[in-house]
Image: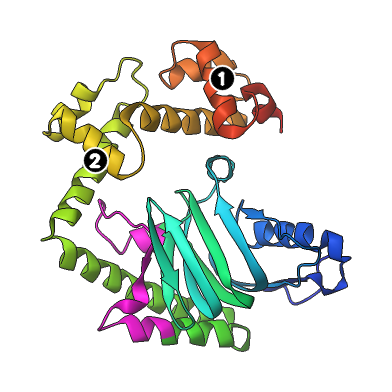
Amino acid sequence: MQQIPVPSRQSAWNTAGVRPNEQFAYYREAICQAFMNLTPEPAAAAGFPASVEHVRLGDAAINRVSFPEHVVRRSAADIAASDRSCFYLNLKLAGRCRIQQDGHEVSLSPGQVGIFDSDRQFALLHDRGPQLQVASFWVPAGALRERLPASFDITACRVSDDPFVGHLIVETARALSDGALRMTEEEGVRLFRALIELVAVSLSRRSRAGAAESESLAETTTLALKRAIHRRLREPGLAVADVAGAVGISERYVHKLLARSGSSFTEYVIDNRLDGAARNLRDPAMADRAIGAIAFDWGFSDLSHFTRRFKQRFGCRPRDWRTR
């Protein structure tokens, strides 16, 4: 990919100078460089007029992206292949987008701001064009989590709806999107920190407002359940009764809570064990550790079963994943 030469704080890509049948591939590489590993789905027709502008803000960044209708996904394989975590804070500038994560959907229209987690699978359905535009802030996970309680669970939501700080979030995001390159990087970082403070206020208020509702209670219990599973994820004989007792709920309720999030106990345990094994297989510090040993480390007792499930989840065998 030929990158347009621009100042060091900024990187830019544009498909205008690329042959139509190569434009989507160029765009795919650009967004993976500007964001993290993502899987955009190719457009039906040849030609994909798009541009990506990336502006660094210290450890964070703004990505201004213009594109036609299409879908972007972050898969389990994308997550396992990433060595960083972030939240995406999106200000919709033109068109409409639907964010799907954790079994629910959030829509964004121009002037609205939504947030979602890079460590969970998601789909972005950019489906109201013809030409769409977004300012997407790459927020280091720690920068937001340090402003929230340790147990706070952040999933896709629209933070611009907050009646007290929503309009401030929109205006601050718009000011950064429009003026980042006219500020010094230090000024941009300071304004970005103010934006994250406002987002943290909105998320905290949202959590408190819903805490009295049974739906929120179920979500809190689900979070506690998943934490209990993760604490014992490497135990080969982990059973529903073990985590039900740790959380103080019935085995039947364990199944109900996981079904609400689109999974089952067995699938949730296996998928997270596979994700852990996939990370270890890519870890240079574990390059000499046998694949079977890594599988057993993550609670698998049958190597052939591990290999079969790994291929189902990531599309290749463990040894091929390790050498990619």
- Residue depicted at 23% across the width and 24% down the height: 240
Looking at the rendered structure, the kind of residue marked 1 is Arg
Of the pair 259 and 218, the residue shown nearer to us: 259
Q: Earlier in the sequence, mark 1 or mark 2?
A: 2
Quadrant of image for the C terminus: top right
Which of the numbered marks, if any, corresponds to residue 308? 1
* 2 within the magenta span: no
**Quick check: 324 left or right of 174?**
right
Of the pair 205 and 46, the residue shown nearer to us: 46
Look at the numbered discs 1 and 2 and tell me whether their residues touch, using CB distance below 8 Å: no
Question: Which scheme is used to colour this image of the protein?
Answer: rainbow
Q: Is residue 6 above or below residue 240?
A: below
Q: Secondary structure at mark 1?
A: helix
Q: Is residue 235 above or below residue 101?
A: above
Which of the numbered marks, if any, corresponds to residue 257? 2
The segment highlighted magenta reads: 142-170
**Quick check: 22 left or right of 216?**
right
| Whole-number angstrom distance, CA of label 1 to CA of label 2 | 27 Å
Looking at the rendered structure, the kind of residue marked 2 is Leu
Q: Is residue 51 above or below residue 31?
A: below
- Residue depicted at 55% across the width and 75% down the height: 135
Counting from the top left corner in percent of width and height, residue 39 is at: 63, 51
- Residue depicted at 52% across the width and 83% down the height: 176
Counting from the top left corner in percent of width and height, residue 11 is at: 71, 71
**Quick check: 180 left or right of 20?**
left
* 154 within the magenta span: yes
Evaluate whether residue 88 shows in this view. Answer: no
Extreme residue in the front direction: 44
